[in-house]
Image: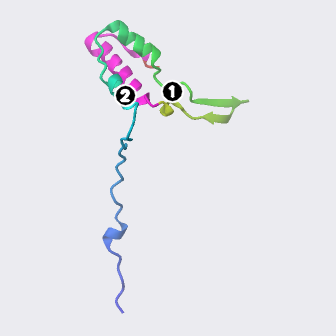
């Protein structure tokens, strides 16, 4: 009796699945997302204001400690915001405008 060998393709991992965001029919937030993404920064005052009001990191993530031990971890809830990626992108546009065009030091905005 001949030994049975497994085909090498059986154990070869497939390429990782590509996650594609499905466009939901009737996604009524999409026009607002596109509008936020299309905003261009041309004013240093506006750029500074956006860098100040859009936080550098999610403000909701917290660790609650009791006598030096972490009792509770609250995960970041920003990603539940439907415009999270657009606001992060807008903040990045503002930072790059201030750094590249205006020649400002942006380290005060990066905390």
Q: Residue at x 31, y 19 (%)?
A: 39
How far apart are labels 2 and 1 at the CA level?
19 Å
Q: Which residues are magenta?
A: 82-109
Disc on res. 58: 1
Horizontally, residue 102 falls left or right of residue 75, namely: left
On screen, 67 above or below 103? below
Q: Residue at x 36, y 21 (%)?
A: 90
Crowding at label 1, few (<14), some or many (≥20) Cα neighbours within 10 Å? some
**Where residue 96 appears, x then y in whole percent?**
31, 18
Crowding at label 2, few (<14), some or many (≥20) Cα neighbours within 10 Å? some
**Where residue 76 appears, x then y in whole percent?**
54, 32
Q: Quadrant of the N terminus?
A: bottom left
Q: Nearer the viewer, mark 2 or mark 1?
A: 2
On screen, 2 above or below 70? below
Front position in the image: 82 or 109: 82
Q: Secondary structure at mark 1?
A: loop
**Sooner in the amino-acid sequence: mark 2 or mark 1:** 2
Pointer 2: what residue?
33
**Where residue 17 appears, x then y in whole percent?**
36, 53
Q: Residue at x 56, y 27 (%)?
A: 60
């Amino acid at each position: 009796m001949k030994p049975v060998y497994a085909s090498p393709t059986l154990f070869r991992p497939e390429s990782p699945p590509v996650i594609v965001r499905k466009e939901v029919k009737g996604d009524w937030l999409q026009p607002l997302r596109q509008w936020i993404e299309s905003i261009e920064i041309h004013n240093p005052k506006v750029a500074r204001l956006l860098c100040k009001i859009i936080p550098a990191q999610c403000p909701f993530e917290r660790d609650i400690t009791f006598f030096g031990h972490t009792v509770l971890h609250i995960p970041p809830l920003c990603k539940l915001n439907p415009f999270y990626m657009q606001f992060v992108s807008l903040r990045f546009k503002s930072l790059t405008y201030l750094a590249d065009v205006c020649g400002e030091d942006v380290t005060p905005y990066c905390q």
